[in-house]
Image (spheres, rainbow, N blue to C red):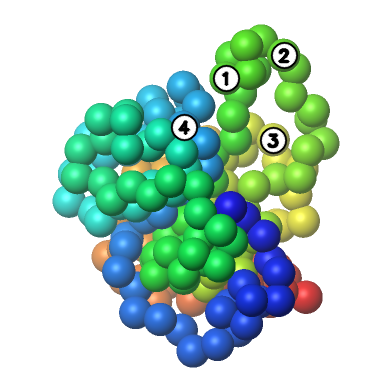
Amino acid sequence: CLSINNKVKELCTGPAPTKEYDVCFIGYPYPSRIAFIRELRQSLPDISLVLVGDTWDNQGIIRAKTYPTLIPEETAKIGLASRIILCKHRNNQDLGGFPIQPKSVNRGYIEAGYRALVMIDKDRPFSSFTDEVEWYSNTAEVVNKIKWYLEDYSRASDKINRAHRLALS
């Protein structure tokens, strides 16, 4: 689903497509992510939301466009058509209580290639990113940040450009 292969890199360095979606989430719907997206949708009922990952279509998220897990090129096209890409780490409960490695690669690296504002939860802050992405602690904070950036999307330009360069370097 997420990979920067030669075809994806070509898409990510080509002409910027029209932005169709306000917010995109790419990943499996673990219980904590389902709860997060439901809370987000309730707080932001009017944004265009796209969810990519197997079984999102069975989660009852209202007014969301859903796709199953796709090949990397198709995932990239959706990411490139999005203004904001949300990243949310799974937690120990999502894995049946098995511990998650604290130094796992942070979500958002590949997504940054999509020329969208990447927002990453602070659950596991080990990352190559510093201020090239927007960090959030909880749903209320990410809702406020989404509203602020969507009011004037040009505010995100600097972060988007720096994260894009880092992801494709």
Q: Residue 71, labelled with which disc? A: none
Gap between marks 1 and 4 measured at Cα: 9 Å
Please state which amino acid type lies under the numbered disc 2. Answer: Phe
Name the element at disc 3: loop
Q: Residue 124, labelled with which disc? A: 3
Q: Position of residue 20 (x, y in %)?
A: 30, 69
Q: Residues within 10 Å of mark 4 (few under 14, many from 20)?
A: many
Whether label 4 touches label 2, CB < 8 Å: no
Q: Is residue 68 visible?
A: yes
Residue named by callout 1: 94
Q: Counting residues from the N terminus, which is met first, the one under dot 1 or under dot 4? A: 4
Q: Residues within 10 Å of mark 3 (few under 14, many from 20)?
A: some
**Residue at x 64% of width, y 47% of height:** 107
Residue named by callout 4: 29
Gap between marks 1 and 3 measured at Cα: 15 Å
Name the element at disc 4: loop
